[in-house]
Amino acid sequence: MIIKTTKAIPSHEITDEHVFKARRTLIKSLFAATLVGNSQSLLAQTNSARWQRLTQSDLSAKTLTPTPAQLVKEYTNYYEFSYNKEDSTKLAQALTVDPWSIEISGEVEQPGKFYLEDILSKQTLEERIYRFRCVEAWSMVVPWVGFPLVNLLNMAKPLSSANFVKFTTTQQPDAMPNLRSEAILQWPYIEGLRIDEATHPLTILAVGMYGDTLPKQNGAPLRLIVPWKYGFKSAKAIVKIELLKKAPLTSWNRSAPDEYGFYANVNPRIPHPRWSQNSERLLGSGFFTSRRQTELFNGYGDQVAGLYNDMDLRHFF
């Protein structure tokens, strides 16, 4: 499935076309291996036909060409490991990601622990090529592999009283050196969405990218992707999901409420207190290749603007 923005990507933003063309080879390697360990080999076989059909037919569209994969893998914000964008690539390899389970609780009819292999056995994996916009005013284009978040939530049968969804990420102090200091943020990392945002068709849980398994530094084995919001909303390595009546206190909002609001929708008209959000640097083959004007809702306004009213728009930050 390809989710497009309303505007075509200008030619100067397109980087490393060979990466895009080579993904069919990567797709084959994905299903020659496993998604989250040996227990997933059967899942890989059962999903391979559907996966290849989605990618090989739908990816002929050229409106969004991915940023080179190696750059995306080596330029990450993962503060549990490092406060720079490079060291997490190496440090995150110490993370244990197999076996993996997600606890779902709160305003649901059937709370419980769901093992990742059981979750994935019920999903049809899709590739979603999305813009990814960081609050730091840089951006990339990433082909994620995953499934709609609503599919997982429905396994626990949300109650009508569920108004918000809280996401809690893993804590592995032996692997994550910054958990010992609680500098900048309190751990574990927590994010949240309104229930209508969480169940929107654009919101996915990613288990892979670039036709391969999700790298540990990019959020393996399961991360949230909400393409119309700033990147810090897309929590990595999720271990717990709670459905709540009231909005949860999220990590960045707790740390700096004047800078990081609950909604954090991409909005060029609302500056961050310390920099403009009017434009963004493009991560590309020359590292940062150029700048582009930032679009409201990161270009996905046609799909998501109806979720918000004027009061919501005043609280992006």
Image (cartoon, rainbow, N blue to C red):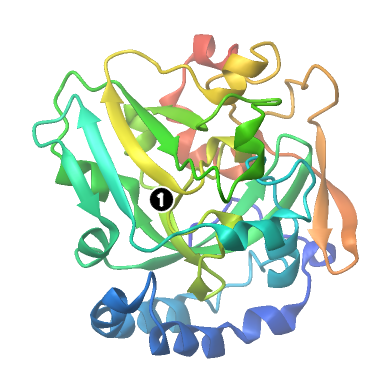
From the viewer's perspective, tell me whether residue 10 is left or right of residue 182.
right
Residue 159 occupies quadrant: top left
Foreground residue among 155 and 148: 155
Residue 11 position, x and y percent, is 80, 67
Residue at figure coordinates x 78%, y 61% from the top left: 10
Q: Quadrant of the C terminus?
A: top right
Foreground residue among 231 and 1: 231
Residue 193 occupies quadrant: top left
Report if residue 253 is visible in the image. Answer: yes
Residue 24 position, x and y percent, is 53, 87
Residue at figure coordinates x 51%, y 46% from the top left: 236
Residue 180 position, x and y percent, is 62, 33
Q: In this figure, which residue is indicated by the disc labeled 1?
A: 204
* 270 w.r.t. 193: above or below: above
Tell me the crowding category of disc 1: few under 14, some 14 to 19, or many 20 or more residues within 10 angstroms, Cα based: many
From the viewer's perspective, tell me whether residue 198 is left or right of residue 316.
left
Identified by mark 1, the residue type is Ile
Foreground residue among 160 and 92: 92
Report if residue 317 is visible in the image. Answer: no
From the viewer's perspective, tell me whether residue 226 is left or right of residue 315.
left
